[in-house]
Amino acid sequence: MEDFIEYDSFVIVDKPQKVYQGYYKDGQPFNGYFSKGNDEFPRVDYYENGEAKFQYSLDIYQMALGGEGEIDESSEMVEIEMSEEEYNEYEKNLYKPKLNIKSVYENGQIINGYEYEEASSVMFSKKIENYNITELHVDVFAMHYYQRTSMVLIADTILIGSPTLDAAGEKLQVRLSRKESGWVADYDINGKHIGSKYFIKGESKNLPVNSTLFLYDQNNDIYGYGTSGFEEYPSRLDLINISNIYFEQPNTFTSENVQAFFKALVDASIIEMKREEDIRSKEPEIYRGYLIIGNNGDITTGVRFFEKENDSYYEEYKNGKKLKKEKVNLIKFQEVFKEYLNNIRED
């Protein structure tokens, strides 16, 4: 052993000690405890013979709400005479962070527990169970402000919500689930359904009812993005901006396996939340249609391009009827599409 380090600024609940030691070999952690992260959110790795075995951490949500190190005023206080030195030691230990979450390493990766990633004023916490990501918690800190957003995989549904908004009396929940050739996100506020978003891949024949749908090409595939409801759309609904992720990384939404999709969505969500706010999503490469769909899944209004093996054309719809059909190639249809949208805006 060439060197060692000592820590006394935290307590590991499973291994309470006054001092934690870590021993280095060839300048690398070898045996014992090694602190990482920052002082406000400490994490500790435990090593045996140069291999990381465990990580110790604490619940950020409870810490942010002041749940760590508080005195329980309801409990009976027992007066004990202490010297000044004993009292200082008692007070220091009382307010030390209590690391009560134990994560397990295998080959340098967390396989059970929590994996953390820090960014400016944000902490991302990925819960891992048996090698698979099952939850993502996003904790945002600012002056006099704190919010947690949680994304949890339950069976075949992904639930997105905010415990901090719930505690303030406004329960917002987004349910993201697989539907036919894509994914649908249903938005609820205080138990009331207020709207849905649709993320579709391919030329879907079953169009989402009572919705507005854009069809376009991106990354050599056909995609559709639609909305339904949302008479009023508060910006706080986008706890995690699923739409931006879809526009920027549409391949994320191509997986039919919920576990694989959740992992990809977690990674994409972290990238999205790290982006600069003034960076806008890129426009679709080529448009294929704009449709308003009725309660039977039929097109009531809009314009749509069709491409057959030896033929291509577009159709225009109004009041539930086919108003026009003309031959056109996909490049020429871009002019038709833009003119159609300009006419709608003028009307």
Image (cartoon, rainbow, N blue to C red):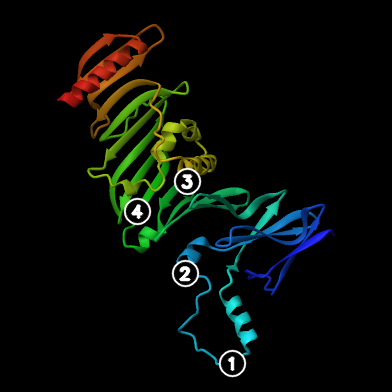
CA–CA distance in space, label 2 to label 1: 26 Å
Q: Of marks 1 and 4, which one's residue comes earlier in the chain?
A: 1
* Closer to viewer: mark 3 or mark 2: 2
CA–CA distance in space, label 3 to label 4: 20 Å
Question: Residue at label 4?
Answer: 172
* Closer to viewer: mark 1 or mark 3: 1
CA–CA distance in space, label 1 to label 3: 55 Å
Q: Of marks 1 and 3, which one's residue comes earlier in the chain?
A: 1
Q: Please, what is the three-letter code of the amino acid marked with disc 2?
A: Gly
Question: Residue at label 3?
Answer: 156
Q: Of marks 2 and 1, which one's residue comes earlier in the chain?
A: 2
Image position of 201 (left or right of 206)? right
State whether residue 82 is above or below residue 107: below
Residue 77 % position (x, y):
51, 89
Q: Residue at x 49, y 85 (%)?
A: 75
Category of crowding for the residue at label 2, using alpha-carbon neighbours closer than 10 angstroms: few (below 14), some (14–19), many (at least 20): few
